[in-house]
């Protein structure tokens, strides 16, 4: 099972566009690119790098939390002809999308809004204490950072929540199954005082509840969400895979230890 | 180019109510209506155009409601609209919609509502707008008599998702068939209600034991108990 890293680091390569959906030019046709974009960007906001599962437990579908972002805004004159052009759209969380609003690709001062499919994000941004920060004084990066509010404390909070949860879950995954087995062994084989028996059963309950939570957390932060699209407009199954920049950061979790434990200890309170 | 206005968290949603007539009272009524529909909102009122423009330029709002005949001057509401210029969805109150419809028919960020429509109707329109934009959903706490056990929650959340999907399909068919407004509104209300339940259950499950228990405390307590009975020489 592949889960997200505790923190998604800014990508060390540009996001390479693999999808080439047939272009359509009717009103709102760009919306049909959503499945392509979800896979293209690994269910991750192209700008702040928060994943769909950072926002919601089970599946983003119809939550409105992720949007299709136009690099050249569709409301601008120059954006109208490229409104439905696939290379003009990226996958973005609602917060980045709304923060940008209709700010132009090039500001009045000549600062350029950077495109994650053309720029290597880790040269421009890094994560410090869960907050995305600017690497140096690159003015285009600063314009991008301010426009998309990449340092928004809300985004930092979501990043922190995932890191803390996954760090705890990974630790518990190593330790808790062993503790449960040892508690079960003692309760099955030793003469335990009534007080200690109550205390042990309580610890058994807490430990098994924790293990339930570990399962929940791992399932929540899977790299491919439960509602991942099983087709896209490109109609090529091999494109329904994660981009290299995301894939290389994933953690491979062995669920054997976690899921082989009998979690029915509540019935032992005899 | 000014810095982008700061976007606050989506919940509560932020609304600016720009009207010179009983703005406070109308805003309170609107907030109550929206709360009943499951939307938490934070309302700011402006009873002069200057205040409204200042707020628009310095703060983030999800929706801005403007009375066009502001300060008894025909053009003042327009001045606010020009300043908003796509920064937020704008709802315009006016007694003369006909004149405005032509001007704003191409503007998807402007919604026109008759001045006499009332706050209840306005709240309903806002709710439907948020639904149409696929919002993250209302977030008020739904209390039920039979709250599910913690372990059952994920399956309940997914079950609700299936039901919501079915309703969306139904809604699509109704819209394609040009069904009457009432039928469509009923389905939309049911979707909102299910999304409420889903959101509430989801947030309950988000409060994991894992979040609150310190791993070191847990391990130490368990080890202390085990040490009384386990053979210290046995390393297995």
Image (cartoon, rainbow, N blue to C red):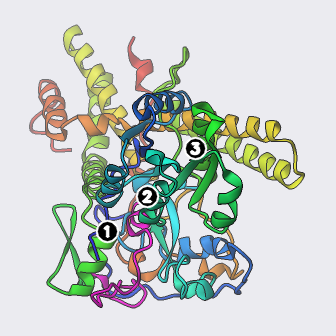
Mark 2–mark 3 Cα distance, whole angstroms, equals 19 Å
The answer to whether A100 appears left or right of A149 in the picture is right
Q: What number is the disc on residue A8?
A: 1
From what the image shows, is residue B157 above or below residue A40?
above
Estimate the spatial distance between the alpha carbons at disc 1 and disc 3, rounded to whole Å: 36 Å
Name the one closer to the observer, A167 or A173: A167
Q: Residue at horizontal 36%, vertical 43%?
A: B46
- Inspect the magenta stretch and tell me whether residue A154 lies in it: no
Which residue is denoted by mark 3 in the rendering? B126
* Disc number lying in front (1 or 2): 2
Question: Furthest residue to the right?
Answer: B177
* Side (left or right) of B200 relative to B218: right
Q: Are marks 1 and 3 in contact (CB under 8 Å)?
A: no
Task: Work out whether mark 2 precedes mark 3 in sequence or the reverse, and give the earlier one.
Answer: 2
Indicate the chain on which mark 3 is placed: B
For the residue carrying disc 1, how many other residues have a C-alpha within 10 Å: few (<14), some (14-19), or many (20+)? many
Residues rendered magenta in the picture: A94-121
Q: Which residue is mark 2?
A: B80
Q: Residue furthest left?
A: B233
> Tag 3, which secondary structure?
helix
Q: Chain of mark 2?
A: B
Q: Is residue A80 left or right of residue A105?
A: right
Q: Circle 1 marks a residue in which chain?
A: A
Q: Quadrant of the N terminus of chain B?
A: bottom left
Marks 1, 3: nearer the viewer: 3
């Amino acid at each position: 099972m592949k889960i997200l890293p505790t923190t998604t680091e800014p990508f060390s390569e540009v996001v390479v566009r693999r999808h080439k959906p047939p272009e359509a030019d009717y009103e709102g046709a760009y919306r049909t690119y959503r499945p392509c974009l979800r896979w293209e960007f690994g269910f991750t906001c192209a700008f702040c790098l928060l994943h769909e599962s950072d926002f919601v437990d089970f599946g983003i579908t119809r939550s409105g939390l992720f949007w299709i972002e136009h690099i050249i805004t569709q409301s601008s004159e120059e954006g109208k002809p490229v409104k439905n052009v696939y290379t003009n759209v990226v996958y973005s969380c609602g917060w980045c999308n709304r923060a940008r609003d209709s700010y132009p690709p090039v500001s009045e001062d000549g600062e350029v809004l950077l495109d994650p499919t053309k720029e290597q994000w880790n040269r421009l941004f890094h994560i410090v204490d869960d907050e995305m920060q600017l690497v140096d004084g690159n003015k285009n990066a600063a314009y991008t950072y301010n426009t998309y509010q990449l340092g928004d404390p809300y985004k930092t909070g979501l990043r922190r929540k995932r890191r803390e949860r996954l760090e705890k879950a990974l630790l518990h995954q190593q330790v808790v199954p062993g503790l449960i087995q040892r508690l079960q062994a003692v309760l099955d084989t030793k003469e335990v005082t009534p007080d200690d028996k109550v205390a042990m059963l309580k610890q058994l309950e807490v430990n098994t509840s924790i293990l339930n939570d570990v399962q929940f957390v791992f399932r929540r932060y899977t790299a491919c969400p439960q509602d991942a699209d099983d087709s896209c407009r490109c109609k090529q199954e091999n494109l329904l895979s994660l981009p290299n920049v995301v894939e290389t950061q994933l953690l491979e979790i062995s669920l054997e230890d976690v899921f082989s434990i009998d979690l029915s200890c509540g019935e032992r309170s005899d | 180019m000014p810095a982008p206005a700061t976007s606050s968290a989506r919940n509560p949603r932020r609304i600016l109510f720009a009207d010179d007539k009983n703005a406070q009272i109308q805003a309170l009524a609107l907030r109550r209506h929206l709360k009943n529909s499951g939307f938490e909102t934070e309302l700011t009122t402006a009873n002069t155009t200057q205040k409204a423009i200042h707020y628009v330029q310095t703060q983030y709002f999800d929706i801005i409601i403007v009375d066009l005949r502001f300060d008894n001057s025909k053009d003042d509401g327009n001045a606010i609209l020009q300043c908003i210029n796509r920064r937020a969805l704008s709802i315009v109150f006016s007694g003369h919609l006909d004149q405005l419809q032509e001007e704003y028919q191409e503007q998807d960020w402007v919604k026109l509502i008759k001045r006499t429509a009332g706050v209840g109707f306005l709240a309903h329109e806002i709710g439907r707008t948020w639904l149409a934009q696929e919002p993250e959903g209302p977030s008020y706490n739904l209390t039920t008599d039979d709250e599910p056990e913690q372990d059952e929650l994920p399956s309940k959340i997914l079950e609700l998702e299936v039901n919501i999907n079915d309703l969306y399909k139904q809604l699509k068919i109704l819209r394609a068939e040009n069904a009457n407004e009432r039928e469509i509104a009923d389905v939309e209300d049911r979707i909102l209600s299910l999304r409420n339940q889903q959101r509430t259950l989801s947030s309950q499950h988000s409060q994991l034991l894992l979040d609150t228990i310190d791993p070191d405390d847990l391990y130490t307590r368990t080890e202390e108990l085990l040490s009384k009975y386990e053979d210290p020489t046995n390393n297995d």
